[in-house]
Image (spheres, rainbow, N blue to C red):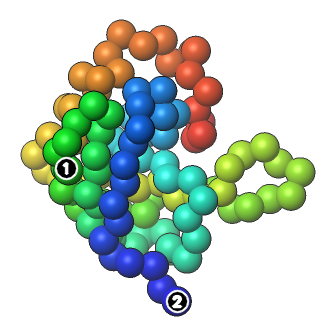
Amino acid sequence: MAPSSILTIDIPDANALRRIYMPFLEGGGLFIPGLQGYVLGNEVFLLVRLPDSDANYPVHARIAWFTPATPGRERQQGFGFQLCDRQHKLKREIEKLIAGDDPAGVNSLTL
């Protein structure tokens, strides 16, 4: 069964957001652990709910990152979604929420 081209992501808190945000991707990105079946380059539509918000942010995204399941390796399986929205509203909101954080203190699921 192929994954949906519309994916709803509910980020529960700022700590979870820090762990999955990928600022090194142009436009920003989100790593979603545990997903299967996507292919690099696939385009999807995300509905993202940020911590302490009732709003869903709709955004066009592209699969830009893949971490496979590897026995004996600590990295979590999942996919990274590059945010392709030219308005970058979601990116701005994410960066407001995590502004002032020390990236060295974040246990990231990516790099």
Q: Residue at x 48, y 27 (%)?
A: 15
- What's the CA distance linking mark 2 and mark 1? 26 Å
Q: Earlier in the sequence, mark 2 or mark 1?
A: 2
**x then y, percent, for residue 87:** 10, 46
**7 sits to left or right of 60:** right
Residue that carries the numbered disc 1 in the rendered image: 57
Q: Tell me the quarter of the picture where residue 91 sits.
A: top left
Indicate the amino acid at tag 2: Met
Q: Residues within 10 Å of mark 2 (few under 14, many from 20)?
A: few
Q: Residue at x 13, y 50 (%)?
A: 86
Give whichever of 97, 13 is nearer the camera.
Answer: 13
Indicate the amino acid at tag 1: Tyr
- Vertical relation: 88 (above or below) 9: above
Query: Circle 1 — which element?
Result: strand
Give whichever of 71, 12 is nearer the camera.
Answer: 12
Q: Residue at x 32, y 34 (%)?
A: 51
Residue 1: which disc?
2
**81 sits to left or right of 55:** right
- Asked if residue 86 can be seen in this view, the reply is yes
**41 sits to left or right of 70:** left
Q: Tell me the quarter of the picture where residue 12 sits.
A: top left
As drawn, the residue found furthest toward the right would be 72
Query: Circle 2 — which element?
Result: loop
- Asked if residue 88 can be seen in this view, the reply is no
**x then y, percent, for residue 62:** 35, 63
Residue 19: which disc?
none
Q: Residue at x 50, y 53 (%)?
A: 32
Q: Tell me if label 2 and label 1 are in contact, CB under 8 Å.
A: no
**x then y, percent, for residue 98:** 35, 21
Quadrant containing the C terminus in the rendered view: top right
Give whichever of 12, 95 is nearer the camera.
Answer: 12
